[in-house]
Amino acid sequence: MLYLAEVQKQKGGLLGSGAKTELKLLACQRTDQNWSTVSEEVISAEEASKLNDGALVLVEMNPNRQVQRIQEAGRPLVNILQNFSRQVEKFKLKEDEIDQWKQSLTFQAQELNRREMDMEARLEQLQQMEDDSQRLEAQQQEVETSRAEIEKLQQEIERNRQELEGAWEHLRGEQRRLEEHQANSQQGTVFDEEQSRVLSDLLDRLSSRIAPGEAVQEHLHVAFEFIEKQQAILNPHWQQLEQQKSVAAQQQEEADCLWQTLCDRQNAWQQTQNSLAQQTAELKVNTAVLAGKQEYAQILKAQLQNQEDFHQQIQVLVASSGGVSQPIDVKALENMPLDELQKLVQDLQEKFDIDSTFVHDQEQELTHKQETIEALQNRANQASDQDVINVEIELAEEKDLYQMLNQTLVGQRRNLLQRQKLLKQHQNILLRRQGHTVDNVEEEAQIDLSPILLQSETLRQQNSQELQKLEREIEQIRAGIELTEGMIHNQNQDIEEKRQELKTMEDNLLSLRTTTAECWGRVNLYQETLQPIQDCVDSMREKLQGIAASLTQVQETGDEQIQMISQLRHTLLSLISQPELLAS
């Protein structure tokens, strides 16, 4: 099981001999991405004696609580933190995506609710129109029935009029006969009894044939009341029609005003688009200049890196040649007890072995990183356009890790060489004290590398200054680009807001035009439905008024006929000489 621990050292005797090294366990790995704290348990681990006090290490232990492997925790912790950072970024992206989905669903729900309310309002309007249409149809049927009754009454009046005209003609004939009798009477001729009775019967029949006008007048009054009732029913509909016309005219005026506003907004939006296009072109030019300077900066960085590697290699050569070897106190070692010297040499040997193993592990990890980079490079070459960005990001991270690990190994290799030389010096002193013959190794020719180091440092400083100057220029250009990008971003947001506003205005205009068209459609339908009924009512009113006028004339004529019959009766009675006829 893998633990995160802290190295704790207790000071010992001379030159660190007898020092005790312990590990305080801090956390335990449960899964690849899951760590949990543990009780602060302290275990003994001499394998960590080469490490500094307070250093963080990863300790691999078997079930018997024995240490199997120790490694520095710096690089693994960096990897864990990087993975955690990537996971946090992924979670943040997911949260942003979820928020966008929530906003989209909320907007869709609001739009559905609005459309549902519009549909319900339109259904109510259609239901009201259907009810009005049914009422108007019922009224039209009543009007048709009234028209039939009026036509029947008109036919009856016409029939009575014809009968009255026939009776009037008959009366005229009798009047002529009476005049002939009067002429005959003046010549000495007198009505006999039979002729007088016939004339009296004719006058009675003529009087009974005069049509009474009261019943017809009552029917006519009922018809007028029915017409006025129908007109009273139609009047609210005409008022509602006028209101609908007013609403439709107002909506039409609002639609025209909104259309003019939309045209003005579209012109302003187009001007903003043109300004944005100009700024975008300037941004592309500055971006091209920045790319050129960045490319030159990359070349300078590559040169500085090569010079740094060259400088480090020279330093490694200086270290390996003994130029920077750690001095030892030979006299103290010569006077040290032999067993302590053997213990010191053994400690140095163990530390060297641990360092050698650790450097070897780091070398293997570096080789593994190189293989990973090559594999990612192959994947990037074969990846599609959608996956190549993710692969390149991962490749850049692995290259950064490789560079950091490689720079760390440079110092570790140099320290390992120094430890090896220090161990060799102590071993030679121990062998001499034990009576063994130590071969005199011919000292390597010492080469003065300081001029090369100085020249390398001077060139590196010149390139560094030039790079700093170039980076300042790049930073200025980048700041200008960021400012332009910020302005473009703000303009894009402004354009997007205006575009959304224009889209909303277009939708509102379309909705208003649709509503206006529907309102005008209702007005036209209402008017087309009401006008025939109104025309029918007006026509029947005119006919009833004509019938009333005719009935008045008929009544006046009837009164005249009654008066004339009365006169004829009086004249006839004056001419009749028989008493029995006078009684009749």
Image (cartoon, grey):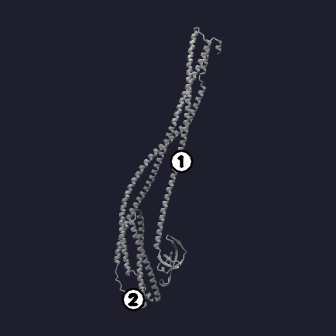
Furthest-front residue in this view: 194
**Mark 1 packing: few (<14 Cα in 10 Å), some, or many (20+)?**
few
Q: Distance between the residues labelled 2 and 1?
A: 108 Å
Quadrant of the drawing holding the C terminus: top right
**499 left or right of 170 in image:** left
Q: Residue at x 39, y 60 (%)?
A: 481
**196 left or right of 357 in image:** right
**Mark 2 packing: few (<14 Cα in 10 Å), some, or many (20+)?**
few
481, above or below 507, in the image? below
- Out of 246 and 304, give the one closest to the viewer: 246
Residue 355, percent across and down? 44, 79
Identify the residue position indicated by label 2 in the image: 438
Q: Residue at x 40, y 51 (%)?
A: 271
- Out of 487 and 120, give the one closest to the viewer: 120
Earlier sequence position, callout 2 versus callout 1: 1
Identify the residue position indicated by label 1 in the image: 120
* Secondary structure of residue under mark 1: helix
Mark toward the viewer: 2 or 1? 1
Q: Residue 375's image quarter?
A: bottom left
213, above or below 402, in the image? above
Q: Is residue 245 visible?
A: no
Residue 190, percent across and down? 60, 10
Q: Can residue 102 be seen in this view?
A: yes
**393 left or right of 124 in image:** left
The kind of residue on which mark 1 rests is Glu
Q: Residue 563's image quarter?
A: top right
Q: Which residue is drawn at 51% across and 41% down?
A: 244
* Secondary structure of residue under mark 2: loop
- Out of 203 and 501, give the one closest to the viewer: 203
Q: How many marks?
A: 2
The kind of residue on which mark 2 rests is Val
Q: Residue 580's image quarter?
A: top right
